[in-house]
Amino acid sequence: MTDNRSYRESTTYDRLVPKVKQRLESLPAFSPEEYKAFAGRLDNHFSQLFSLLFDIYGHQYDFYYHLEELLVLMGTAWFTRKRALKRRDLQRENKPYWYQSNQQVGAVCYVDLFAIDIKGIIDHIPYFKELGITYLHLMPLFDCPPEENDGGYAVSSFRKVNPSLGTIQDLQQLTDRLHEEGISLALDLVFNHTSNEHEWAQKALTGDPRFERFYFLFDDRILPDQYEHSLREIFPDEHPGAFTYLREQKKWVWTTFHSYQWDLNYQNQDVFNAMADEMLAIANLGADVIRLDAVPFIWKQMGTSCENLPLAHTLIRAFNAVCRIAAPSLLFKSEAIVHPDDVKSYIDMKECQISYNPLFMALLWNTMATREVNLLQAALIQRHQLPDGCAWVNYVRCHDDIGWTFADEDAAQLGINGFDHRRFLNAFYTGRFDGSFARGLPFQENLKTGDARISGTCASLAGLEFALQTNDQTEIEFAKRRVLLLHGLILTLGGMPLLYLGDELGVINDYSFTQDPGKAHDSRWVHRPQLSDAMREKRHDPDTIEHEIFTGLLKIINIRKQQAAFSGPDLQVIATENNHVIGFLRQADNQRLLVFANFSETSQPIAANIFRLYGLTYRFQNLLTQKILTLENLTLQPYELAILKALDADAIF
Ligand code: GLC
Ligand code: GLC
């Protein structure tokens, strides 16, 4: 026995393991060697798994029954895990922090919008390689309702690929090819809800008691009303509150998001097991990272907001423990777009090893609008640090809206009123604010609370769409620089940078979604355009904006990959004392790199004495322009990103 087990844990272990072994022995895939490997991992991590599950379900009469079922399904998954994946498990055990490396560059796309189908994605591997991509997140690709499906986030089966995208075999082929090319694959586990067409929901609809307990179904409004007292409305445009009425069944069902996305009831251990089984199936397809969708919502409790509750963390940790035993190299990426303290609460080696960095993303856009780096700088000083081993996934845009999730208390310290400031940002990014360069759309504007989020592509929000309409050459130039500056920061900050494909070409908003009844009410589709080879071909034509953005971005990607100091999470903010310029220092061994970004449309100096304060009295090379400089008189051009490498760095140490 490798861990210190309580009496309860060890008696359970001693009683359950032989039974589980016996059941596994009857499987055709059973092999004594594989069982030994599984049993070893189980032995190592049983205590963790048991205590977490006990905290959630220990009081239920059938706890031990479900625990046994879970161990059997985990063993079964292990037996079906391919040899190549088991080799990968071992490799990653030896190199566990691969996602912190400067060699890593992530990208995300919809299969259909990028390349029609999964085979198309395989054909585009050379494009990913050209961009230096080593981590590919494919947006939900499992079976979902044909019309409205929230971009695939309403899953009807986790075992079947959406037929319009291909088959499980295609997906497996893709995974193998990506792995051969050194690209890791991230897939979603949409585990807060299923679509109403999922087999579980369908069975619940017919009154099957086992599956009715998979969801939150109510005969009347008594409990829903009580819950709603303390719930936030997530998609108020679509339906008020958090529940949907099922006419035929005369019941209410919990639907945090769309009416066709039914929240799963994790108070039922059967649901935990069922989802663990789906998760391991996805892991066994070869996913390296699972994006845990909408993590804050998975545990509900009367009288609370039903977001970020302690047992939500316990649940994720229990899923994590399942992976440590049955799919050891699998990592979790958290998707929590909430208050920064809550975002951070999911990030831990025992919970989600990596996480979207929505605060940095929102503050990048905030800084673009205000031209003032105060909030961004404060956040980098106070909120950037993560537990050992963990990493941020830094992004400029993703498939979702931008929510202004900075902390009001941080803003207040700088004399900014959070509520008013969000109103300003929404006005700015919808182009309603006088002088704004941005062309975005409001998303889920809540007239009751005055709240809204923003949709729009990176290029449109950065001013390109407006500049092209007005054919203003200076504005076009500024917009390109803004796009590169934003990406330059996510590539140098530390952690996994994640490009939203299309942005590497400066693709602007696509308003055709308004013609599609399944999409018209959801403005996020404005930044989910159909991409094509013809669009991508333009990167080769030096006269195009696509070319300038693509090559500009590639240059920064290459710099990232050449400089070891861009590995790892550590960063020191350089207080530039110029509120338009953010600056930070990255270092590793004997290498020192300085990154500066000027968020304004005028040239900005940085006083020489600033650098002396930090002991940076060396010669530097600007890696983007190759120029050699001292920091006596550093002036940044409008929207300039500067990556400076200390040339005499050896002397520093
Ligand atoms: C996540 C997804 C979003 C989806 C929601 C519901 O937030 O990113 O696109 O609408 O979950 O699944
Ligand atoms: C969830 C997500 C957030 C998004 C919303 C709709 O709340 O956490 O990213 O704003 O869904 O897209």
Image (cartoon, rainbow, N blue to C red):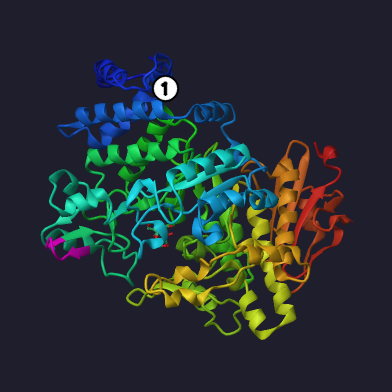
**Residue 538 at what x, y percent from top left?**
70, 66
x 33%, y 45%: residue: 312
Disc 1 residue type (three-letter): Arg
**Which of the 4 image quadrants contains residue 597?**
bottom right
- Residue 383 showing in the rendered view: no
> Crowding at label 1, few (<14), some or many (≥20) Cα neighbours within 10 Å?
some
Residue placed most toward the observer, 383 or 286: 286
Q: In the picture provided, is 11 more to the left or to the right than 36? A: left
Q: Nearer the viewer, residue 388 or 90?
A: 90
Image: 573 above or below 70:
below
User: Percent x, y for residue 53?
Assistant: 29, 33
Whereabouts is ligand 1, in terms of quadrant?
bottom left
Residue pictured at 34% horizontal, 22% vertical: 28
**Residue 18, above or below 128:** above
On screen, residue 224 versus residue 351, left or right, reads left
- Check residue 226 for magenta coloring: no
Quarter of the picture containing the N terminus is top left
In this rendering, is residue 1 above or below 576? above
- Is residue 193 among what the camera can see? yes
What percent of the width, then of the height, locates residue 457? 56, 68
- Ligand 1 under 8 Å from disc 1 Cβ: no
- Span of residues in magenta: 244-251
Q: Does residue 578 appear to the left or right of 523 in the view shown?
A: right
Quarter placement of the C terminus: top right
Q: Secondary structure at mark 1?
A: helix
Magenta stretch encompasses residue 246: yes
**In this figure, which residue is indicated by the disc labeled 1?**
41
415 vs 447: above or below: above
The number of discs equals 1
Q: Position of residue 226 (x, y in %)?
A: 17, 60
